[in-house]
Image (spheres, rainbow, N blue to C red):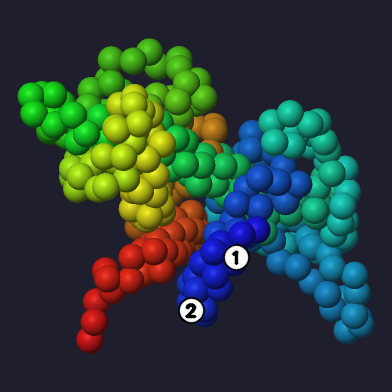
Amino acid sequence: MKLTEIKFLKKLIKDKIVFASIITLVLMYIFVAFAGFFAAYSKYFSDRNLSYSPPSKIYIINQEGRISFPYTYNYERRFNAETFRMDYIPDRSQKYFLKFFSKGDEYKLFGLIPANIHLVKVDEPGRLFLLGTDINGRDVFSRLFYGGQISLTIGFLALLISFPIGLLYGGISGYFGGKTDAVMMRIAEAIMSIPGFFLLITLAAILPANMTSVQRFTLITTILAFIGWAGFSRVVRGMVLSIKTKEFIEASRAVGASSLRIITRHILPQTASYVIIAMTLSVPGYILAESGLSFLGLGIQQPDASWGNMLKEAQEYVNVLYRPWLLTPGFLIFIAVLAFNLVGDAVRDVLDPKSRVRN
């Protein structure tokens, strides 16, 4: 690691809040990367007899008052004629001890490596629902990990599409100027005027209903990236207009360097600070966009999980009052977006000290 990179990291983690945000994001991405290991069940597991089951209670003190290895009880569902609601009563006739690093449902690590080891499970027919279940009896805790794989990665995938396009497009427009610049900027402005939300609604109405979640995920990512690059290219174009008049650019022209080489090797690297800042501040927007679309039913569809479609059940006030664990995806979205914004602001302050607001 270079000395400049070390200094950059030291400045970045100097603020305790920013450091905590970085640790939070690192942990989130570790959890979703190893989702199959941390999740007790697969994302398609369902026990409809335990619909809206409350979180499992973990006991470390047995009925004799002695310290015991952690265990839990299954719930029995009974209809309450007085409240007209289903009550969940622990069945204390059978203990189910927690088993760590135990074999369970098979999954593919990183989508490639077959594995079946889980962090914690209980033996069948025991059920371990650390954050309760949804309407279909699916484990919310397990689905949070699988849902995070989509909600936390869509931002970076969209950036891989939009930023290279915007960077090169803005660089060419600003470098050549004149009529080329005018035409290219009018095209960018036309793309910026496209109402992305209504475009996605229209596509959702005309696309086949049997599309897989992978296909929908790819489509959402592509559309968000296609709409997002135009605004970024305008900023890059403005920076290139000032950079191309520098002496080192004139020297490159004098030695016969091609326009493409000057743009890619000499001009665009000068915008690196802004690009890094823009990337860190853009990811939260893509996370919120995917979550909002999935929440409205235009994104990832059940039974596949994303934090947006998991949060959809929490729109009913009855669930908010009696099943607060269904709000957990919304809390994670809030934490992820807040952490990215804090890190993005810190990166901006380090790379561009003039941007700091002085008291």
Q: Amino acid at mark 1?
A: Leu
Toward the front, the furthest residue is: 255
- Check disc 2 and report the residue beneath it: 15
**Res 197 → quadrant:** top left
**Res 233 → quadrant:** top left
| Helix, strand or loop at mark 2 | loop
The residues bearing labels 2 and 1 have C-alpha atoms spaced at a distance of 20 Å
How far across and how far down the image is residue 3, in percent? Answer: 60, 65
**Residue drawn 74% across and 32% down?**
108
Toward the bottom, the furthest residue is: 359
**Residue drawn 33% across and 65% down?**
352
Q: Amino acid at mark 2?
A: Asp
**Along the line of sight, the residue nearer the viewer: 235 or 261:** 261
Where does the C terminus fall, quadrant-wise?
A: bottom left
**Along the line of sight, the residue nearer the viewer: 184 or 249:** 249
Residue 85 shows in the view:
no
How far across and how far down the image is residue 166, in percent? Answer: 30, 34
How far across and how far down the image is residue 161, in percent? Answer: 40, 31
**Residue drawn 44% across and 35% down?**
160
- Check disc 1 and report the residue beneath it: 3
Image label count = 2
